[in-house]
Amino acid sequence: MTSSDNAGSTPHPRHDKATGRQPLFYGWYVVAAAFAVTFVGFGAAYSFSAFVDALQQEFNASRGAVSLVFSLAGFLYFGLGVVTGPLADRFGSRPMAIIGMVLVASGLVLAGFAQSLLQVYLAYGLGVGLGVGFAYVPSVGTVQRWFARRRGFASGLAVSGIGFGTLIMPLLAALLIGTLGWRSAYITLGVLSAVLGISMALLIVNDPRSRGLGPDGGPPLQPAPSGVSEGIELKQAIRSRPFLTLYFAGLIASFGLFVPFVHLVPFATDQGMSAGEGAFLLGMVGVGSTIGRFLLGNVADLIGRRTALILAFAGMAATLVIWAVSVSLVPLAIFGLTFGTFYGGFVALMPALVMDYFGGRHVSGIIGVLYTSVALGTLVGPTAAGYAYDLSQDYTLAIVGSIVVNLVAAMAVATLGKPEAAEK
């Protein structure tokens, strides 16, 4: 526990003597803060699809070259968790989240002043990539400590910020690009990100015991006796079969997971739709993502989180078939909604499964290492899809590949046994 997470360092609700009501469990404030951080960070990241055409025209670049901007950011924000997760376990999640929000906002503003695609790589790719990397894993990891019985639901609620960000930010970006131009759109998004992200990150508290609480608002857990771990050590965890299986599943699936986030909007404009309609389709992924975080996160607490993760991978594979055969707005909207639902479940379930298998002592660090698998897949997948399109003027190969890798991920997770602590 660090001084940044002391009970007196953040305002919190007090007992209402007049009504006798107990204050709202502070864990839900932590969930709200993680929601805002993921909304800002991933909303900024996934709004990139709205900028693809403008960047292609501005810098006379290929779709593959422009897609690399997103892939670089994605590689950084998933890969950096291997560093920021352990740092959060040691120093607290709040400073990590604040630094992340500052970097996201700065990267967006600087992208608005870029004079070359290389400068966009540096501003957006590094700013947003490093910013989300600093904020995401620490924020989501902290939520796991505040809940036990309702961990799946709380984790899903926290990361539903990603879904809302995917819904709102691309639509806002398309509106701003149409009215102010792409440069002013980036600057405006940067200012909004700074105001919302930093203010909400201040609510993050690392551990319920710093407020005299336990998970789910119960009595505080007693520290483990000397020499007894409250969870598996990081080095031991990453050599275990459950971790290696989850790592492989995250890696292989991520080659296809993020292709729609970059290419759905340009795919729509290729079919003659407007940029606004393309942003709407990406927004539908956000709507589905939000539903999935609530739905699969809650259902997982009943059927088991491992089973629910298998369902998420298989569901994404099935819904990608819809994209493969669709060329008009309505079926593509159905694809966006259903794909987003299963994708949202995947994002909600991975951190909760880490807690199930390995305990809470090093949860942020383990999540951080696990997400390097997603980082590698994100670096390769969207960029490869862009260059495949440049060669063939078609997305069929990229979509079929995405279907296959999700099915392989589902089969990998199916080989896992249940955690020693039975799934809730």
Image: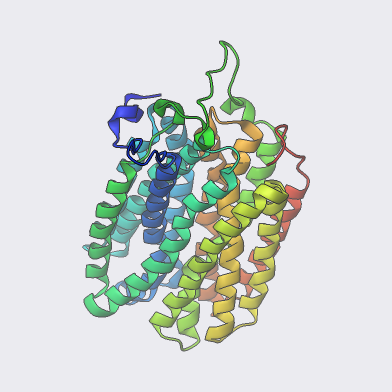
Q: Quadrant of the C terminus?
A: top right
Q: Residue at x 66, y 35 (%)?
A: 357
Q: Quadrant of the N terminus?
A: top left
Q: Residue at x 55, y 72 (%)?
A: 336
Q: Residue at x 56, y 79 (%)?
A: 332
Q: Residue at x 61, y 83 (%)?
A: 326
- Residue 45's quadrant in the figure? bottom left
Residue 65 appearing in the image: no
- Residue 409's quadrant in the figure? bottom right
Q: Position of residue 250 (x, y in %)?
A: 62, 50
Q: Is residue 230 above or below residue 409?
A: above
Q: Is residue 38 left or right of residue 392?
A: left
Q: Is residue 51 above or below residue 165?
A: below
Q: Position of residue 137 (x, y in %)?
A: 46, 42
Q: Position of residue 394 (x, y in %)?
A: 57, 79
Q: Position of residue 385 (x, y in %)?
A: 54, 67
- Residue 342's quadrant in the figure? bottom right
Q: How many marks?
A: 0
**382 vs 164, nearest the viewer:** 164
